[in-house]
Image (cartoon, coloured by chain):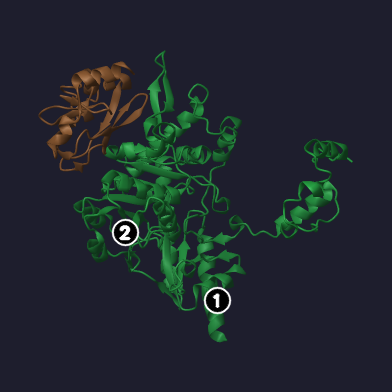
């Protein structure tokens, strides 16, 4: 699993979500707006928003790619993002356009040390 | 010499000028080029308060208020019955003097009134959610266009050629900044041209804005329109006259995604065209794209029912440049007028107001068409406004009837130069049967007078 500096994660199978750290910082998530399958995003492009009781934050594509699926369950259960960000709280399945972009992302240890200094 | 309303004395003026190093008033204004300054103002010498009152009363007496004439003027604003209790309740200082009173700690009454307004708007329009109100019908329509674009991520909005032209202008103004393309669907026989709509409904269309009843009073073929708009994957925004909804199908029930309109007819004074109130409501999937304030009902820490603004993450103070709109306010007092009006006339009363307006309008249209030189302009069914084709220019008819204390209607040439012989006539419950007789009689004699010459 890799991480972007804007706190999205990208799993090996192309699953995209937000890190546990980000979910904790946001507080209770009340709404998630996600793109429909088929849409294509450049690396760093905004693909949706996550809304908590205290803020609305943009979600950025960790790498370039095409949306294969988005997590429809979050419409009814946005709290999954807080409860299980790496499991039931996933956001998108991504078809990665350029694998080279993946290796340039942060690995878990680097990401954890980055957020530890915050 | 001190004046009551001019609080500065000459010594005070000199002191202030001295403090900033200006020798005189002339010195202070030196940077303003002389040719840009107003010369000596031609203000007569002072008069007593009594004399001024008499003078102003004399000027006011020369006004001819619409309420003292037989008015058939509509076109967006019309004279309607306003129950006295509306003004009485709305004039309470708790409602009347407060400005943007959204703090739940101190404004439960106002917030509850807003909540009731939203509930009434939803019931009238058949929509799931309403906001706390907009400035007026035209700005609500502009917001509807932006909402279609946000929700579909498409960049083109169609507006019916039968939409109130001033509303269409506001839509274009709203669309100008974000660079949204606005395309007009032409009208045919007073209604939206369905064949032209088919051709224009391409895959890049975000939504269609259609007005029912239209600016010509016409009842647009809403089912046919809705089916076509849905098939194109676009949104349908309907501009509705709230009084007409006492009789007509609610837009939410024939497939509208957004419903907006002006609430002047609901207990608001004409006030020379404003301030009025706009309403705006939508279906639940579009909730996050709805602009403006939304008031919600909840429970306080003791379990009592209470009211507070909700879903504020759509708004500017939280979402900044990504907010759904730049509107951070509502028309609370005018929305209150509308709420009180609807509460007072009730469901049956609203139906009766709508029905009387419709019956009298159809009666008058029929009578007018029997007068030589006048005929129905369009074949489309109408509610309480209709267009009469006039042999002589409509402006002339209006001028001729003015002398008889009759405001004959709105000459459409003021909007459409090629419709110089088209007169838009509006009839409401405020037009008595006697008014209708007087109108027909005036047209008849005016026509005969002209023929005799």
Q: Quadrant of residue B67?
A: bottom right
Residue at the outermost top position: B302
Q: Is residue B163 left or right of residue B6?
A: left
x and y percentages locating residue B306 in the rendered image = 43, 22
Q: Which residue is mark 2?
A: B220
Q: Which residue is mark 1?
A: B445
Instruction: Examine the rendering and report whether any part of residue B170 can be seen.
Output: yes
Q: Is residue A86 left or right of residue B70?
A: left
Residue at the outermost right position: B1
Chain ID at mark 2: B
Chain ID at mark 1: B
Name the tint of chain A in the rendering.
Answer: brown
**Earlier-in-chain disc, 2 versus 1:** 2
Name the tint of chain B in the rendering.
Answer: green
x and y percentages locating residue B16 in the rendered image = 80, 37
x and y percentages locating residue B328 in the rendered image = 46, 37
């Amino acid at each position: 699993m890799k991480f972007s500096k804007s706190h999205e994660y990208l799993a090996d199978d192309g699953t995209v979500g937000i890190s546990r750290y980000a979910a904790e910082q946001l507080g209770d998530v009340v709404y998630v707006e996600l793109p429909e399958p088929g849409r294509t995003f450049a690396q760093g492009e905004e693909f949706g928003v996550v809304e908590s009781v205290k803020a609305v934050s943009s979600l950025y594509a960790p790498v370039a790619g095409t949306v294969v699926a988005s997590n429809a369950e979050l419409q009814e259960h946005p709290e999954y993002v807080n409860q299980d960000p790496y499991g039931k709280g996933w956001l998108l399945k991504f078809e990665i356009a350029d694998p080279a972009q993946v290796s340039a992302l942060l690995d878990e240890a680097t990401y954890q040390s980055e957020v530890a200094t915050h | 010499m001190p004046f009551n309303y001019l609080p500065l004395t000459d010594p005070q003026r000199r002191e202030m000028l001295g403090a900033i190093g200006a020798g005189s008033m002339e010195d202070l204004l030196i940077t303003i080029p002389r040719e840009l300054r107003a010369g000596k103002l031609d203000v007569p010498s002072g008069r007593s308060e009594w004399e001024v009152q008499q003078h102003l009363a004399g000027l006011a007496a020369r006004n001819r208020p619409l309420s003292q004439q037989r008015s058939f003027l509509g076109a967006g604003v019309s004279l309607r019955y306003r129950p006295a209790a509306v003004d009485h309740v709305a004039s309470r200082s708790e409602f009347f003097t407060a400005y943007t009173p959204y703090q739940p700690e101190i404004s439960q009454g106002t917030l509850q009134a807003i909540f009731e307004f939203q509930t009434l708007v939803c019931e009238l329009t058949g929509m799931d959610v309403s906001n706390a109100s907009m400035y007026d019908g035209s700005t609500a329509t502009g917001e509807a266009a932006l909402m279609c674009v946000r929700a579909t991520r498409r960049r083109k909005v169609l507006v019916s050629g039968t939409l109130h032209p001033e509303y269409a202008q506001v839509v274009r103004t709203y669309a100008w900044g974000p660079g949204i393309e606005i395309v007009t669907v032409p009208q045919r026989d007073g209604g939206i041209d369905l064949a032209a709509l088919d051709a224009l409904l391409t895959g890049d269309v975000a939504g269609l804005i259609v007005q029912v009843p239209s600016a010509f009073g016409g009842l647009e073929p809403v089912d046919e329109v809705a089916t076509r708009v849905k098939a194109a994957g676009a949104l349908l925004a309907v501009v509705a006259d709230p009084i007409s909804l006492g009789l007509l199908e609610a837009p939410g029930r024939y497939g509208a995604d957004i419903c907006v309109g002006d609430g002047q007819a609901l207990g608001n004074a004409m006030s020379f065209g404003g301030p009025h109130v706009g309403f705006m409501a939508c279906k639940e999937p579009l909730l996050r794209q709805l602009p403006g304030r939304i008031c919600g009902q909840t429970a306080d820490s003791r379990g009592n029912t209470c009211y507070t603004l909700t879903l504020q993450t759509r708004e500017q103070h939280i979402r900044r440049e990504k907010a759904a709109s730049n509107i951070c306010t509502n028309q609370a007092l005018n929305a209150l007028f509308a709420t009180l009006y609807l509460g007072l006339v009730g469901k049956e009363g609203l139906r009766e107001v709508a029905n009387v307006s419709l019956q009298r309008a159809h009666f008058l249209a029929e009578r007018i068409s029997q007068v030589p030189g006048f005929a129905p302009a369009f074949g489309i069914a109408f509610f309480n406004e209709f267009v009469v084709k006039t042999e002589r220019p409509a402006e002339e008819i209006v001028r001729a009837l003015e002398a008889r204390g009759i405001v004959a209607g709105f000459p459409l040439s003021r909007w459409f130069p090629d419709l110089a012989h088209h007169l838009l006539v509006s009839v409401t419950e405020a037009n008595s049967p006697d008014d209708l007789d007087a109108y027909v009689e005036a047209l008849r004699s005016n026509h005969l007078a002209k023929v005799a010459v």
